[in-house]
Image: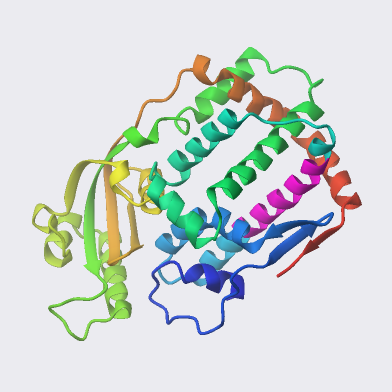
Amino acid sequence: MTRYLAALALSVLTIQPAFSEPVEVNGIAAKVNGRIITKNEVSFMLAPRYAQLATQFPRRGPEFERQFNESREKIMQELVDRQIILSEFEQKGAAIKDNIIDEEVDRQIRELYNGNEAKFREELKKSRLTMDRYREITREKMVVEFMRAQQFADAPPPLPNEIQNEYNKIKTELRDQSKDKITFQKIFIPSADPENPLATPETQLALAEGIAKEIEGGKDFAELAKTYSKDAFAAEGGLQEDVPRTDFAAEFAAIIFEAPENKVVGPLLDPRGFTIVKVTGKNLGPSPTLGEVRPMIEQRVQRTKTSAQYERWIEGKRKRAMIEIND
């Protein structure tokens, strides 16, 4: 595991021993034409994805590493491209209004942190980023979108059927997630069992994995919950009905709300142990009308239609830029 991954791991409960390797407080992740991208910025952008992967893969392992590295490489490329484009934007003397930046920050808190501003600010603090710096990062991201739109302003406009099809494809993603509710069955295995002083996080995870296999083999979820689960809903077969999305940690909600109904998910890493979930019903929040989001949908269609042109354009910029990426 790299030092970078180890540093992130310290902020999430694991069943593995603590890392003894010293953690760098901050450093330079990359330089682009002399402009610095800090490791703290990369860490902050990775934090929601890392938390979800850590929850999904309690033992970490190759798939965890693969997905984490893939996410990090994608974020690094995004940040590098952002710095390349920013220099051109600033040469034009353009600006983005503060209220537009505020709206985008609010959207990110809703979607990445389940509307939990306290959690968002906690992650800022962990990454040693101020709100002002985060607003600046958000501004930079919006500049990239603006410059991309400007670069291909002469492209053919989206057709009505293209707009409608794109809206139909993503309208569920655009819903008010704070209104989501879910019904599910749950088996909770604590990492420490007061009734068994010999239990360790490792043995408790092995127990949870064994229970999940029994369910896959056809055993009744409710009966196993009554036998093994250690929470207030065990007697009801682990059933919890119409629980608001906002009651869950963002990373946990992201996993279970994406799971198909009647699919068993887990064991998932919980701050206090391990959780197996079977989703039995969802009541999702309302989606905006096409009229409310038409400009954004048109922009998405335009971006898709010009993606090949954009890649050629940005690749040319990359070749001329002075880029230095650190491990």
Q: Is residue 166 left or right of residue 323?
A: left
Is residue 83 found inside the magenta-colored segment of the image?
A: yes
- Which corner quadrant holds the N terminus? bottom right
Q: Is residue 71 above or below residue 60?
A: above
The residue lying at 10 percent from left, 52 percent from top is 236
Towards the viewer: 259 or 302: 302
Give the colouring mode of the picture: rainbow
Most prominent secondary structure in the magenta stretch? helix
Give the mark count.
0
Is residue 124 found inside the magenta-colored segment of the image?
A: no
Q: Which residues are magenta?
A: 71-87
Query: Percent from the top left, x then y, of residue 228?
Result: 16, 67
The residue lying at 60 percent from left, 61 percent from top is 40
Towards the viewer: 19 or 232: 19
Q: Is residue 36 visible?
A: yes
- Which corner quadrant holds the C terminus? bottom right
Query: Percent from the top left, x then y, of residue 232?
Result: 12, 57
Query: Percent from the top left, x then y, of residue 235?
Result: 8, 57
Query: Percent from the top left, x then y, of residue 71?
Result: 60, 56
Towards the viewer: 296 or 241: 296
Q: Is residue 2 visible?
A: no
Instruction: Name the residue furthest right.
Output: 320
Towards the viewer: 62 or 80: 80
The residue lying at 39 percent from left, 69 percent from top is 13
Q: Is residue 49 left or right of residue 324?
A: left
Q: Is residue 31 left or right of residue 253?
A: right
Q: Is residue 18 left or right of residue 84?
A: left
Q: Is residue 124 above or below residue 101?
A: below
